[in-house]
Image: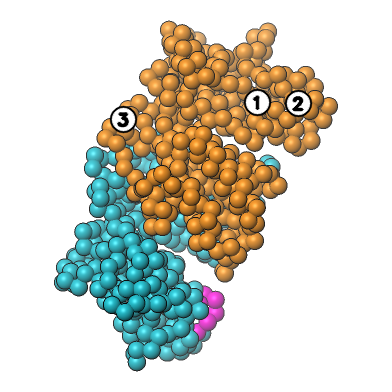
Chain colours: A cyan, B orange
């Protein structure tokens, strides 16, 4: 058990990671046993962690800067779903012993770019050698006024189901990378792949939904699966109209070429959009706040009694899905 | 990229991990995107993260309950070194797709046992499949009154260097597991291996050292290497007398059989004892507080001007080490 990073753990920290902690005195220059952060009175700590593994969550040959940014963004997306403002993150990297300077430099550059974009700073971590695939674990810390966090468990019968942005691009981007839909025009293929590599955490929208969304989640497991999570913990059912699910032009092109990809759009995950419910009387306020956040928001269905998620086609017939939703649907008469 | 846990991520969370979140409402039953924790006014958040990998930090066949407890304890040891009181932790597990119920049950039992022992609770995490070795990442959250955290950078010329417990057992335990010192009596071998598997985070001592230790660190990289960390960030040098380094009976037996193992004792790491400096006039108070914490504390040397760490033998001659310390030592005349 002598795996060691050829470049040296301390050298890697000093050269690549310490500069990312600048501006946060509580990071203690990454030179102590832990970070010490001050938390303002009345602000709750919101904390989440996510792992990305080469060969599982990204391709071993993916650009290191994009991997770094996706790692940060999937964690920030969890904070967005809670209505939290991000502050800092910790980063644990298990790397091959012979990891290259080029990889580390690109990885650091990706982190630096998104630190600037999202206002977060590195405050701690661990860097070790692994005989296995690159394994990255980030823990994001955010804050929210006490009692104001968005939750998954507040969806109510009669609520409208909203989703931000467009759905399915990430899952279809993965299909493009796996060689599907080769006839799709290059521009569309590139757009889908870009969305797979680089999701957009909807932080401003999350902040805007405080006090108005009854339930919220980020779409990481798939639209239907994540809506099912909301339904389960809220004790309700939901109905979604396929025709209203917002699709990008590229996704529409993909579906024209490969209609059976509808399953991936509905159940594929990797969207990192916000899925939330709110009362019908909040409809205008939701639109106002979404516009302020600069993020399109679309009504895709409603909450009802029962359990599970039903997706209907344009004729009102249920769409059967292998993963998630339909088979569990059991709406009760109102 | 379809690695999935055969047992199912959600099933594993519900069955093995959710019960570990009981008692902390902010964990939200591990059923939300993040945990939401309240932080008392005047308390700083202390946060650290550590990774353990099968085949690097533990043996693939090690008992899962011991692996779980070591994972928690190495993180808690970082909190101890900051003088922080532990509160909660997050846990990310990258597991083989076919991880067994038996492994998961033992892993959970280990976590549950040490949660009770150290007063922490699970508040979040991520569970994924990996084609590589078991890779575990824990992030520990603790609290310390604002301004009271112990740091590494406060060692002053004239300070005494103290260390808790005994040094070297962990590194020698690893040697036993690797087949060295086969003639050592079984009881000693077992004692060293037990210390390697299960370090004792010195949390009560860390709390007791608030306001009295000038610098503190936990011994994870090795006595000399960690003292060198203190010296480097404090801008001082340190002298350690080998004869005063506290050794267990088992370690003494090992060194009698294998004298060259002195290097492993001084530079081997995995002790998780607290190494700290304090003014000579605090000597009695240190002893009082250590007694209150129930942890033996030993004076092993002193802080002086210069840089680096010098370890002297009984004749006062420097002990050369391959790893850490001596070669960098350059004390300046007082």
- Residue appearing at x 58%, y 63% in the figure: B7
Mark nearer the N terminus (1 vs 3)? 3
Q: Nearer the viewer, mark 1 or mark 2?
A: 2
**In the rendering, at what x and y percent does residue A94 appear?**
56, 50
**B270 lies above or below A245:** above
Chain of the residue under the numbered disc 1 shown in the image: B
Mark nearer the N terminus (2 vs 3)? 3
**In the rendering, at what x and y percent does residue B177 appear?**
74, 36
Quadrant of the snapshot with the N terminus of chain A: top right
According to the image, label 3 marks what residue?
B146
According to the image, label 1 marks what residue?
B168
According to the image, label 2 marks what residue?
B187
Mark nearer the N terminus (1 vs 2)? 1
Range covered by the magenta-colored residues: A175-181
Regarding residue A191, the answer to whether it shows in the image is: no
**In the rendering, at what x and y percent does residue A112 appear?**
39, 52
């Amino acid at each position: 058990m002598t795996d060691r990073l050829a470049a040296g753990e301390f050298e890697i920290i000093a050269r690549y990671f310490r500069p990312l902690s600048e501006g946060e005195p509580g990071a203690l220059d990454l030179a102590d046993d832990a970070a010490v952060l001050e938390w303002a009175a009345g602000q709750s700590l919101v904390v989440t962690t996510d792992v990305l593994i080469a060969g599982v969550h990204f391709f071993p040959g993916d650009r290191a800067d994009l991997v770094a940014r996706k790692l940060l963004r999937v964690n920030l997306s969890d904070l967005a779903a809670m209505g939290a403002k991000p502050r800092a993150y910790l980063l644990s990297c298990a790397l091959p012993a012979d990891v290259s300077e080029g990889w580390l430099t690109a990885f650091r550059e990706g982190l630096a770019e998104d630190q600037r974009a999202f206002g977060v700073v590195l405050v701690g971590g661990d860097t070790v050698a692994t005989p296995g695939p690159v394994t990255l674990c980030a823990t994001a810390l955010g804050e929210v006024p006490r009692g104001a966090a968005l939750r998954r468990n507040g969806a109510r019968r009669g609520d409208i189901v909203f989703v931000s942005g467009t759905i399915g691009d990430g899952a279809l981007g993965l299909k493009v990378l796996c060689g599907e839909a080769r006839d799709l025009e290059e521009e569309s293929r590139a757009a889908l792949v870009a969305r797979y590599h680089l999701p957009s955490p909807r932080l401003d929208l999350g902040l805007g939904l405080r006090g108005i969304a009854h339930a919220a989640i980020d779409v990481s497991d798939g639209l239907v699966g994540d809506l099912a999570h909301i339904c389960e913990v809220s004790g309700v059912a939901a109905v979604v109209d396929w025709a209203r699910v917002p699709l990008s032009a590229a996704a529409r092109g993909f579906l024209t070429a490969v209609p059976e990809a509808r399953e991936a759009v509905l159940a594929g995950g990797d969207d990192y959009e916000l899925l939330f419910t709110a009362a019908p009387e909040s409809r205008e306020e939701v639109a106002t706040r979404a516009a302020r956040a600069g993020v399109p928001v679309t009504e895709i269905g409603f909450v009802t009694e029962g359990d599970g998620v039903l997706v209907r086609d344009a004729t009102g017939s249920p769409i059967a899905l292998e993963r998630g939703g339909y088979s569990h649907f059991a709406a009760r008469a109102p």
